[in-house]
Structure formats: structure tokens, C-alpha cells
Amino acid sequence: MTLTSIARVGLLAGSVFLSVPCGVGLAQRAGEEPIIFTAQNGETADAFRGQFLVPENRADPDSRMITISYVRFAATGPQAGPPIIYLAGGPGGSGSGTAQGRRFPLFMAMREHGDVIAFDQRGTGSSERPPTCVSSQVPDPARPTSDLDVTASYRAALDECVGFWQAEGVDLLGYTTRQSVADLSDLRTHLGADSVVLWGISYGSHLALAALNERPDEIDRVIIASAEGLDQTVKLPARTDAYIGRLQAAVNTQPEAQALYPDIAGLMRRVHARLEVEPVLLDVPSSDGSSQPLLLQRPHLQQLSSALIADPSSAAMLLDLYGRLDQGDPSLVIALLSYFGGVGEPVSLRAMPTAMDMASGISAERRALFDSQAPDGLIGRYLNFPMPQLDNALPGLDLGPDFRRGPVGDTPLLLLTGTLDGRTYPEGQSEAVAGLTGVTQVMVRNAGHNLFMTSPEVAEVMADFMRGDPVRTREIVVPLPDFTHHPMQR
């Protein structure tokens, strides 16, 4: 079973571009072409698509050059400030793809404060992308597996893929957050700006914090949500368990849901223990009409869970999944495995997200803590799979302790934190910015990982911050979903 499709959440949609004459009032810059940008909802906006070249690996004087791409939405406000660069999550998300989706209205609103740049980080979106590696590692989905088996298959796949990428002329050592920080500096120069505003979420916040660490003088201010600190690529299992406790408290506010799920942690442990003793053989439909047998085991379920805990709405699906399995009903897990796909397929790896996470790495101290917590953790070792399974698998890639040291300084920074974020936890988010004195943190009660569009108030506090005004509130409350229903409910 190919599991990175489950562990990595979010759809990385491509962008749609049509070349058109330059719109009224838009100033074209060198290296750009005018386009009409089309969002998934059919709305359009005048924009420019730009490109510039950077070394794939700046540490190699003979490095090949690669193309970096972006979409620029011109400022609309009368007192526009520095360019605002959107940094997508993942790693592996596309800025231009994100602008197409649900956040399109927010991209348009942010134009009041400056040009908005939907940035495709190296190896993503319309930027030059290394080919995906399809390894020869095909784990038999109908046979028993273990955490060690999963790690072994992915490390063997990585060994193959390193050779594959080398044969394709790809320098994997160039796909690090530090190289992306230098790309941001080159983008700033390309745009002719003295400084920029960074706006990111999840891994995009990781990149923004790294930029604050290394090039603070080039950054005017920062907005980040669902922050991932520089030593937080791998989250601690005990904090995942604490999140389940917060989820339980939220469920307990709904009597019908509380009656169904009075002990979420106990339910999950009970189902895991049963699968350890007696795995369940499933028949999983494929998109081509065929089906594949899968012996459902604890590692499979933990990896599904890692995708479902991101937001409260998907957590409702997690509850139903475990509730059904506890009653002997595998129908929802079959539907989810069919949706994610990959059963019986070879292990496939993408260069950019694989290398970026490996390069950011994990400190020895944090790894020891992770290893001590993982055996009893509800999600075990799989929240950030395939890390730390691939930790230190490629010599020379890890950026080391200096990179993982958190930023310091007084750059104004707005941090938006969802209290029910199942991917980057509130405690860790506060720690990620602890060395910065200019932080304004806004808690979004009941929001999860993808919080930007949960309430109009989120956009309002972002606008306050961008104008330099006092942020109107430090707490936004959004409604909880009905934990007894979800979109895949039959």
C-alpha cells in the first residue's frame, strides 16, 4: 500500500492560466506575462505570471539552473505596501494552486495591502519539478506488516529513488528549506522590492520562520497560521494524544455525539488492540473497476487517522470510522482506502516534499522523545510519515541544529492558531515563535489546521495587522461541526 498519499493531506490542485492583454491599471514587470487567473469556482482575476532562474543547489558552483514560477495579483489599495508572498503548506503545495481554491477570496482581499504573490516553491506547481519516482517496492497488502516493515520498504524505495533522480540530473541536496529561503530573496530582488511580507500556513510557516532566521532584514512583517517550528517537522505523539483529549471535550458539548463517543482514546486503543490480534481482510475497490485485497492492520488505521485529524469536520469521519470498526463494520474504512488509492501499488516518492522534510530533520533530543512516546501514542509513528522513518537516510541533506534553532527578533508577526488543529498543536505553535517579541497570537476556537476560511473575522484581523492597526480581537470563535455526521455518512 502506498501510504504517503494518506499521510500527506490536502489536494494540490494545478492552476489554470489564459494569456490575455494587460488589464487596465496593471503594470507589467520584466519577465512577466499578463494572464487571466481562473479560480475553481469560475471567478477570474487579472494577474501576471512570472518566472526567474535560480541554482538548483547553491552549494555547488556547477549547479544547473531551475525555473521558479509565481502568479502576481496587482495591488488595489491606495497605500499598498511591500509584496505579499503566499507560502503554501505540505511541503509540496502550490501557491498558485491554493489561490485557485477556497482561499481565492482571501487572495483578492489581500491585494488592498500590496501585490499578492502566489508563489510556487521550487519543485511545486508551475515551477520546475523533478519527476516522481515510482520504485520497485510493492508491499503485499494482503500479508501481515509491522512498523519495521513499513520503514524498511520506504527506505529501500528512497535508495532507488536517489539513483533515479541522479540519473535524471536532479540534485536532491538542493531541495531544502534553506534553498527556498534563498529563492525568496531572489524573488524579492526580481520584484524590485526592498522588503516583502510573508504569508504562510503549515509548512509555509516553517519556511517563513526559516526566512526570519536567516534574512530578517528583507522581511517587513509575517502572517502565519497553523505554525510548524523549525524543529517541529516531526510532531510529538504525546501532543497528538493531548489533541484527542481536546477533541473529546468538544464532542462532549454535543449530547448525542457524547453518547456515541464517550471515550475516543479508549475506542481507538480498543480497535488497534483488536487489529493487532486479528487483522481484517478487506476487498478494496480501485478506480479502474478492479479490487485489491488488504489485510487491515493497526499501521494502516493510524495512517488514515493522521489524515483525518487535521480539522474538526474530518475528525467527525475519524469518530465514525472507529465506531463502525468497533462494531465490526469496515464499510467506511473501505471507502476511505478506495478514495486515497494506492492499495497494491509501488511506493512512489516526490523529490521536493521528501527532501524538504528530511533536510529539516529532527534533533537527537526530539527523536529520543518521539521514540519513547510513539509505542503508546494513538497515531504512533505516522502523523508526519515518512518522517522520521527516513531521518538521516541521505548523507549531507540534514540542515543541522543551527537551522532548527528558532528565530529571534522583533519583526511584527501575526500567528493564527486553531484550538482543534490536529496537525500542528497549539503548544508547539507558541514554542515556534517564542524567540520573537513582535508576535500577536489570535486563537481561533474550534478551528482546525485549515483555518483561513473558517470565519470572516480571520480576514478582518489579518487586515488590521497589515494596516498596522491594533488587532481587534485575540480570540475568534467558530461553530463546531455536528460530530455525528460527515460528508461520507451513508
Image (cartoon, rainbow, N blue to C red):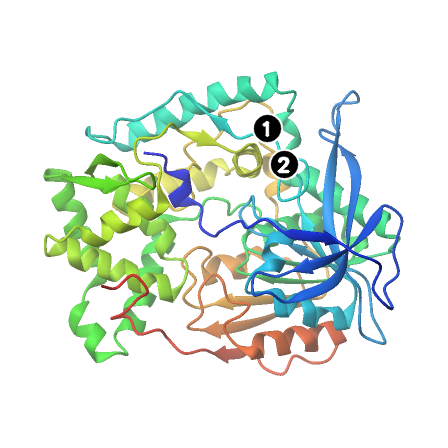
Would you place residue 337 above or below residue 293 in this image?
below
Residue lying at 31% horizontally and 61% vertically, measured from the top left: 244
Of residues 309 and 339, the one nearer the viewer is 339
In x, y percent, where is residue 130? 61, 30
Q: Mark 1 or mark 2: which comes first in sequence? A: 2
The answer to whether residue 94 is visible is yes
Q: Amino acid at mark 2?
A: Thr
**Cα distance in 3D space between marks 1 and 2:** 8 Å
Left or right: 189 with respect to 90?
right
Asked if disc 1 and disc 2 are in contact, CB closer than 8 Å, the reply is yes
Q: Residue at x 78, y 43 (%)?
A: 51
Query: How many neighbours does mark 1 have within 10 angstroms: few (below 14), some (14-19), or many (20 or more)?
Result: many
Dot 2 alpha-carbon crowd within 10 angstroms: few under 14, some 14 to 19, many 20 or more = many
Please give the residue where the numbered disc 1 appears in the rendered image: 397
Residue found at the far bottom of this picture: 472
Q: Which residue is mark 2?
A: 176
Decide if residue 385 is in sight here.
no
Q: Which mark is residue 363?
A: none
Give the percent coordinates (x, y) of residue 292. Answer: 24, 35
Residue 460 versus residue 355 in the image, above or below: below
Q: Amino acid at mark 1?
A: Leu
Q: Which quarter of the rendered picture does the C terminus lie within?
A: bottom left
| Element on which disc 2 rests | loop
Q: Give above or below for 2 relative to 200.
A: above
Q: Residue at x 33, y 44 (%)?
A: 303
- In the image, is 271 to the left or to the right of 105? left
Residue depicted at 86% across the width and 68% down the height: 24
